[in-house]
Image: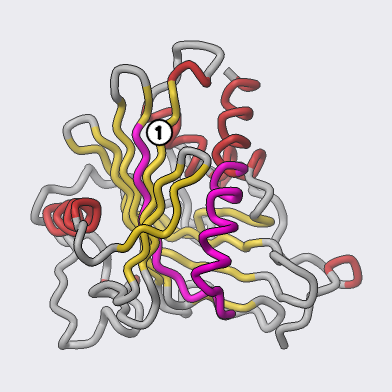
Amino acid sequence: SDLEINNEQKEDKYSTITPQQQIGNTNFNQNNNEIEMSTALSIEEEIFPKKYLNEAEAKSDFKFIFNKENIIKFIEEQINDKSSYKSLVNKNGFDIYIKETGSIFNSEFPMIKMFYKIPKSTFTHNKVTVKLLDDYMNKPEKRIKWDKTIRYYNIVERHNEEVYILHYICKSPMIFVSERDVVDKRYDFYENGIYYDFSSSTNNDIVPIDDDIVRITDHCSVCKILEENDCFDIISITQVDTKFNVPPSMLSAQLPIKYKDWYDAMVNEINERN
């Protein structure tokens, strides 16, 4: 059903994060069994175990090899692609583009590319680094405190220090629309001082589907953050099937507002906590 869930009348299966599930020196898988941490991946080493691949990626005709070299190449090609992406809107400091033909991971849904600069003067101190931004954007124990768009955000399995499975539940965006959840395999890493993030949907065996929540099964996103003299440059590219139609006119009207609110909330949290 796509009707709104009345969470007050049913037990919430997704409690707050436990200390054992937080990112730290020791990490646990979904069954809380301790696993050994491995070192950072080499440029050509395959990133994801086969069990993390989704149905499309597991097919024999899917030729993309998940290693650091190819991930960086894919991200940089998308960032520098000026012919396939069309300008959607430039507002509130966000320069947003759309690519209707999708990506090698899915050709059915558009890619949304966003450029944004956070001036260093926005922060109340000079301790902010790319690593700190990464922490507040991705560490569950930090993200859950400021991101009001999500109800649950947790690492449910970690393969090594750079590769993990993330499960999160997005709050309902409107009345009579169910919550959405996403189960992503993620690869977070630094290369030459630049932060990169790649994620795409995993198969549904990792986290079983909840009948009361709509699972987003087609999702791919990348992010790049680099530090400049007076600002932090953030570029994100997302492709997602939201399970309801969102026309470009609504995207151009809503995305700059939603992005601004999201980044402002993160900046405020960083300023309050540091």
Q: Quadrant of the C terminus?
A: top right
The span shown in magenta is 233-261
Q: Residue furthest right?
A: 9
| Residue at 29% across, 32% down | 226
Residue at position x 19%, y 59% in the image? 74
Vertical comparison of 109 with 37: above or below = below
Which amino acid type is shown beneath numbered disc 1? Answer: Lys
Question: Horizontally, is 80 left or right of 148 in the view?
Answer: left
For the N terminus, the quadrant is bottom right
* Mark 1 neighbour class, 10 Å CA radius: few under 14, some 14 to 19, many 20 or more: some
Q: Which residue is mark 1?
A: 117
Query: x, y percentage for residue 131?
Result: 38, 30
Q: Nearer the viewer, residue 81 or 70?
A: 81
180 and 87: which one is in front? Answer: 87
Would residue 203 be counted in the magenta stretch? no
Magenta highlight on residue 257? yes
Q: Position of residue 65 (x, y in %)?
A: 15, 68
Q: Seen in the image, is 260 located left or right of residue 42?
A: right
Q: Is residue 79 placed above or below 19 in the rendered structure? A: below
Q: Is residue 194 above or below residue 202?
A: above
The colour scheme used to paint the residues is secondary structure
Q: Quadrant of residue 5?
A: bottom right
Residue at 39% x, 61% y is 112
Can the viewer see residue 185 in this picture? no
Q: Residue furthest left?
A: 44
Is disc 1 placed on a helix, strand or loop?
Answer: strand
| Quadrant in the picture for residue 227 | top left
Q: Quadrant of residue 110?
A: bottom left
